[in-house]
Amino acid sequence: MDNGVALITGGASGIGFAVAAQLGRAGYTVVVLGRNTESGRQAATALCASGIDAVGDGADFSNHAEVASLRERLGPLAEPEILVCSAGVMSEKMSKTLRTAPDEWDRVLGVNLLGVVNALSHFAPPMVAARSGRVIALSACLGRFSGPGTSGGLAPYRVSKAAVNALIRNFAAETGWGARGVLVDAVCPNHCRTPMGGPDAPRSADEGAETVAWLAQTDLENRQKFVGNVDFPLTGLLWEDQEIISW
């Protein structure tokens, strides 16, 4: 079974790797992209060992030129049906607004925000031209303006994820709220046991990946059946555990 290509940034480990495994088992060819070529290829080898059709590569997604070079290397695989933007970094523990060095702001915003911008710039245009595709970006509860986790601290991380939410909402509007065949959403996976989340987090990476994989494989009609009758398009939204949550 070949359902097409799913390209996952940050796919070499953590939630991104779990998303790749779930989509691979669903019949997609998965392109797992790490911070460098070696990490991506190692992840692809592990996926292939479990019977998944996987290709690995990598780039620094905060660097536009590196992503452009990656796109050229990937050839036809650079035109995916699914794009998952999972690459991310946490800011330093005590990174409050007035106590954070400029380099730390650059590092976190570079990966978490510009990484998504560069992924969209290089891999989303074929979807828009084909009027078909799914884009899912990993957000975080710490990037929300409502709900838990809004008490300050970790400033670069919080700001970067709030900006990702705004970017996804804006791109969904630019692509017609699903009317032109491209669905664009953000997911809050919650605190998961990953290299970034640590070994004591309450959720597994597989649990964090489930809503991402579900969104990647559902159209507006099936989302409507699952969520129920609503008076707005079921895309351009923030999701958690297959439910819509407030920004």
Image (cartoon, rainbow, N blue to C red):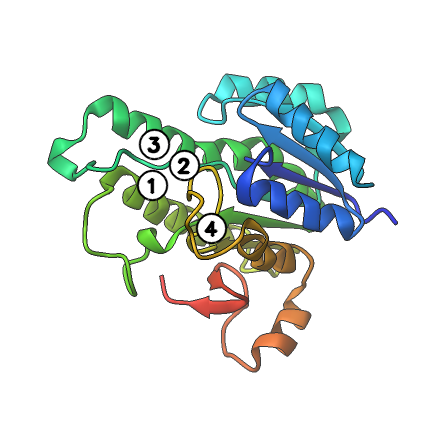
* Structural distance between the alpha carbons of marks 1 and 4: 19 Å
Q: Determine whether, in the image, residue 135 is placed left or right of residue 82.
A: left
Q: Are marks 4 and 3 in contact (CB under 8 Å)?
A: no
Q: Residues within 10 Å of mark 2 (few under 14, many from 20)?
A: many
Q: Secondary structure at mark 4?
A: loop
Residue 175 drawn at (x, y percent): 55, 52
Distance (Cα) linking label 1 and label 2: 6 Å
Q: Circles 2 and 4: CB distance less than 8 Å?
A: no
Asked whether the residues under the numbered discs 1 and 2 touch, taking CB atoms below 8 Å apart as contact, a structural biologist would say yes
Task: Give the CA separation, mark 4 to mark 3.
Answer: 19 Å
The mark nearer the N terminus, 3 or 1, is: 3
Numbered circle sitting on residue 160: 1
132 in relation to 90, above or below? below
Mark 4 — residue?
192
Report crowding for label 3: few under 14, some 14 to 19, many 20 or more residues within 10 A (C-alpha).
many
Return the residue found at the far front: 200
Looking at the rendered structure, the number of numbered marks drawn on it comes to 4
> Disc 3 versus disc 2: distance between alpha carbons?
6 Å
Which residue is at 53% across, 24% downward? Answer: 35
> From what the image shows, is residue 119 above or below residue 103?
below
Q: Earlier in the sequence, mark 4 or mark 3?
A: 3
- Cβ–Cβ under 8 Å for marks 3 and 2: yes
Q: Residue at x 32, y 52 (%)?
A: 142
Q: Residues within 10 Å of mark 4 (few under 14, many from 20)?
A: many
Disc 3 vs disc 1: Cβ atoms closer than 8 Å? yes
Question: Is residue 168 or residue 38 the one in the foreground?
Answer: 38
